[in-house]
Amino acid sequence: MKTSGVLGKVVGYQMRRANLHFIEAASCALARYEITPLQWSALARIEANPGCNQSELGVALAINRSGAAKVVARLVALDLLERRPTCDPRAYALEITPEGRDVLAEGGAAIHDSEQEILQVLDEAEQRELSRLLLKLAQPAGRAQAGCGEPAMPRQASTAGQRRKIS
């Protein structure tokens, strides 16, 4: 299907389209480990921020509480992650297991290889520039830091009950 002139000018739309290619490639690269790109990202966040809790992880991954619970449960079931008690009986500290470290490293290498296939249309300088710009966009100034090393996602106003006319 042809992209309209309007969509071709929307940066977010173009980023989303490119991201779909990367997610598909990462999914294929991680299939042998029986985890998704989101679950691999959770391992990476936890490895970089040992002891963070499930709520902090959810904020870092920009997913809701129940989504974070499912990610953690899956990684625990695969013995890639451990929940450890804290002084707060309602929360657990998340720790990556040795098996989780192996999957993180091997999966990361597999993802890197899959990304190189997509990025081959760019020369090395363009790849470095793309990475630099994406990092810059992912860290907007003025956003408060949350747990697991990621800025908090701004809350959006509810649009329940509101209708918007689309012509």
Image (tube, helix red, strand yellow):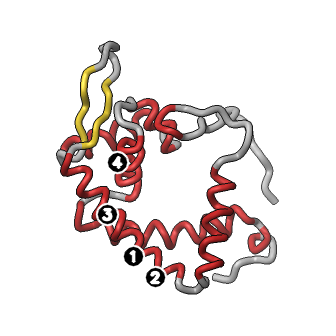
Marks 3 and 2, how far apart at CA: 16 Å
Marks 1 and 4, how far apart at CA: 19 Å
Residue drawn at (65%, 78%) of the image: 126
Marks 2 and 4, how far apart at CA: 24 Å
Q: Which mark is residue 77?
A: none
The residue indicated by pointer 4 is: 43
Do the residues under discs 4 and 3 have CB atoms within 8 angstroms? yes
The spot of residue 119 in percent (x, y) is 54, 79
- Near mark 4 (Cα within 10 A), the count class, few <14, some 14-19 or many ≥20, is many
Q: Is residue 110 above or below residue 150?
A: below
Residue drawn at (73%, 42%) of the image: 141
The spot of residue 86 in percent (x, y) is 30, 19
Marks 2 and 1, how far apart at CA: 7 Å
Q: On the rendered image, what quadrant is the N terminus found in?
A: bottom right
In the picture, residue 77 is in which quadrant? top left
The residue indicated by pointer 1 is: 113
Q: Is residue 111 left or right of residue 144?
A: left
Residue type, label 4: Leu
Q: Nearer the viewer, residue 146 or 156?
A: 146
Do the residues under discs 2 and 1 have CB atoms within 8 angstroms? yes
Per the image, label 2 sits on a secondary structure element best described as helix
The spot of residue 11 in percent (x, y) is 73, 65
Q: Earlier in the sequence, mark 3 or mark 2?
A: 3
Q: Earlier in the sequence, mark 4 or mark 3?
A: 4
Residue drawn at (41%, 75%) of the image: 114
Residue type, label 3: Gly
